[in-house]
Every structure is written in C-alpha cells, then in structure tokens.
Image: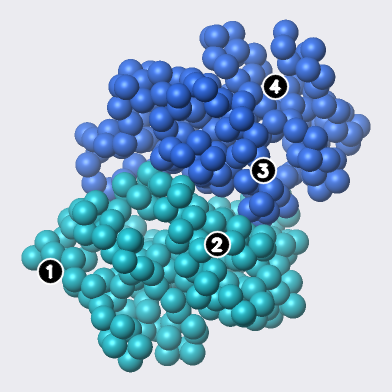
Chain colours: A cyan, B blue
Amino acid sequence: MNSLKQKILTEGKVLSDSVIKVDGFLNHQVDPAFMQSMGEEFSRRFRGCGITKVLTLESSGIAPAVMTGLCLGVPVIFARKRKSLTLHEQLYSAEVYSYTKQESSEISVSKDYIEANDKVLIIDDILANGQAALGMVDIVNQVGATLEGIGIVIEKGFQEGGEVLRKRGIHVETLAAIASLADGQVTFQTKEVLSQ
Amino acid sequence: MNSLKQKILTEGKVLSDSVIKVDGFLNHQVDPAFMQSMGEEFSRRFRGCGITKVLTLESSGIAPAVMTGLCLGVPVIFARKRKSLTLHEQLYSAEVYSYTKQESSEISVSKDYIEANDKVLIIDDILANGQAALGMVDIVNQVGATLEGIGIVIEKGFQEGGEVLRKRGIHVETLAAIASLADGQVTFQTKEVLSQ
C-alpha cells in the first residue's frame, strides 16, 4: 500500500537496525481517515472469505481492526492483555512472550463473543517475531473457529514472524513489509520476496 | 442517545449496584457501525468548537474516539498506560488512581503530538469516579492547550465523576447517563437531572 509506505518513509523514525517508531500514525496518534483507507484495503484483500469476526489485540490493533470491521460489516473483538476480574472460566486464553519486555503475559477473549462457526480475520498493527499473532491463532484454534487469515499493517520482514505464520499455511496479508532498517534506512520488500 | 440506551438495556449485564458489564458492545466486542453512529453523535454535539485533536485513553476509548475523529476530520491520540521505553523526557504524564484495582498508574502522551494551540476533545467509554478523565484534563492543562469538552459513552451518574468535571466548568456530553443500577435494574437519568 503505497500511501502507507510513503508515511513510513516520511514519518517513521528508525531507532536501530530492528526498531522503527511509528507513534505518529499507528501506535499513539492515528489519522482516522488514513486508518479507514487501511481498513478498506484489508477488506478488499479478504472480501469473499465470508469473514464473520475480526479479532485483534489491545491497544494498537484496535483502530485498524475497527475500520476493517466497518468495511466488512462484522463485529470486532479485542483480546485483552489482562484477565477481567470476573468470569475467569468464561475465557479463552493464550500465552504471549514479549521479546521487548522479556516476559510472558496472557491474552484472553470471552467465550461469549466467538464461536466454532465463526470465520475469523486477525488484524494487528505490527508483525515482528509473531508472538502476538500466534497467541490469537491459538485462541481461534481453541474455539474451533476457522482462521481465514491475518492482516498486518507493518511487517518486519527481517524477523521470523511472517515466515512462521506462512509456513503454517496461514494467509497473511501485509500492507507494508520492511526488508531492512540497516543504516537508518527503510527498505521495503518486493512482492517477489513476500510470495516466497 | 436512544439506540445506545436500548443496547444497554438489552445487552448490558448488571453485576451489582455499581457495576454493569458492557463487554458485548463497548469494552471487548464492538459493532463498528454502531461505534460510527456514536462518533457522529459526539461530532454533532461538539461541532463548531473548532476541535483540532481528539484525546482518549487506551484501550476501550480508542474505538469511539477514532470514529469521532473520523467525523470531525482530526487526528486522535491515545494516552498510553505504560511509558514507552524511549524518550521519557518527551512525555506529558499524569497519575490516575483506579478504585477497581486500588492502585495508581501513570498515563502519558508524547509532546510530539499535542500543542498549546490545540483545541482538544477528550473521549472516553465510561465515566465513573472521573479519575481517567481528570488525568487527561491534567495533561491538556500541562500542554496549555484548550479543553473544548469531554464526550462520554456511558456515565454512571450515581458516582461523582460527572459532578467533579462539571463543577470545574467543563462541557461534558454523555450519550447515556445511568441514574441507578439498584435491584439489577438500569434506570437512566433524565435531561433535567443532567443539566443541574
């Protein structure tokens, strides 16, 4: 998605060979009209899959997920990072390891809002090592629902998450896949690399 | 907003005299089209104020805030509950006490995305004791920006938050104000009570 790549080039701040700060348009401040255009793009890529639910993880996934749900006309569930104080037995949960924080945490979804006959599209803001996405895949599998695919705003193609998910046969769509952040420069993957 | 009140009556679960669970349409699962209609209503109520930024707090405020920003055509910032690992000195921060968790936490907003000449609309999902809203008001004041008002999806009118904010002269708009949850019944406030 060229408008996104342009935003990454002009507004993203490369902090190291593996970290790019996209607070200005994805993780902290968002441009709702731009979010809507990303929702339309995800919707276009997964239209015809019969999606019945969009699943994301709080917090940065919520804005793109809600816009995708708006375009597809389906509900959006955001997995919580903390269990609710009530009704623990009513939750599907999965462990997610954070390499940044070097700790495991639990994400959970209420059994009330996702069912075995759901066709689920997972949306998330950034795909790096894939831990958050794998946690959500785990929850979809526990439910026995059908995972139709995963839509990612920015994929760090130089980390293993995308490969791990695609090797499992999951349909992963990325709006902008970064090949490298070396020397403070953002280089995007070409379609050829992505489809390997 | 009658459609919201109807949803609270049919889908809300009263757990005690002070707690109502609205996970099905606000805190965990959201209906994006319904969120958009709430964004349109906030936009209608604050149109003409010259809003330049919508400010909310992760996570449950994000969906209504992004839809409000979409209608008003302005960026949305979500205050973070944890400080970023980088650039601490680049943050406005405020303490927020949670009565539910009985602990204080810090919320923060990057200095990059909010300025003294901004006209800010705060959007949040639920107003109870007002601590989260007051934390965001504190940040707007630190910036020296103009607080144009606060839009709340559900106000628990039997808790003090609304009164505290209105006594400060803040323009608070609530889409559904609950007067009581006694005996497992939801009773809404009338306009007369709200305008006192």
Please determine if labels 2 and 1 lie on a single subunit. Answer: yes
Question: Viewer-proximal residue, A77 or B88?
Answer: A77
Cβ–Cβ under 8 Å for marks 1 and 4: no
State the image coordinates of residue B134 (x, y, percent, origin top left): 50, 22
Report the mark closest to the observer, 4 or 3: 3
- Few, some or many C-alpha atoms within 10 Å of disc 1 (few <14, some 14-19, many ≥20)? few
Give the farthest residue toward the left: A183
Q: Which residue is drawn at 35% across and 50% down?
A: A25
Q: Where is residue B162 in the image (x, y as percent from the top left)?
A: 64, 19
Residue B97 in view of the camera: no
Chain where mark 4 sits = B
Residue labelled with disc 3: B37
Determine which of the numbered discs, if any, sits on residue A68 in the image.
Answer: 2
The picture quadrant where one finds residue A56 is: bottom right
Kind of residue at disc 4: Gln
Sequence-wise first label, 4 or 3: 3
User: In this picture, is A91 found above or below B67?
Assistant: below
Left or right: B187 as drawn, with respect to B64: right
Per the image, the residue denoted by label 1 is: A182
Tell me whether marks 4 and 2 sit on the same chain: no
Asked whether residue A33 is in view, the answer is yes
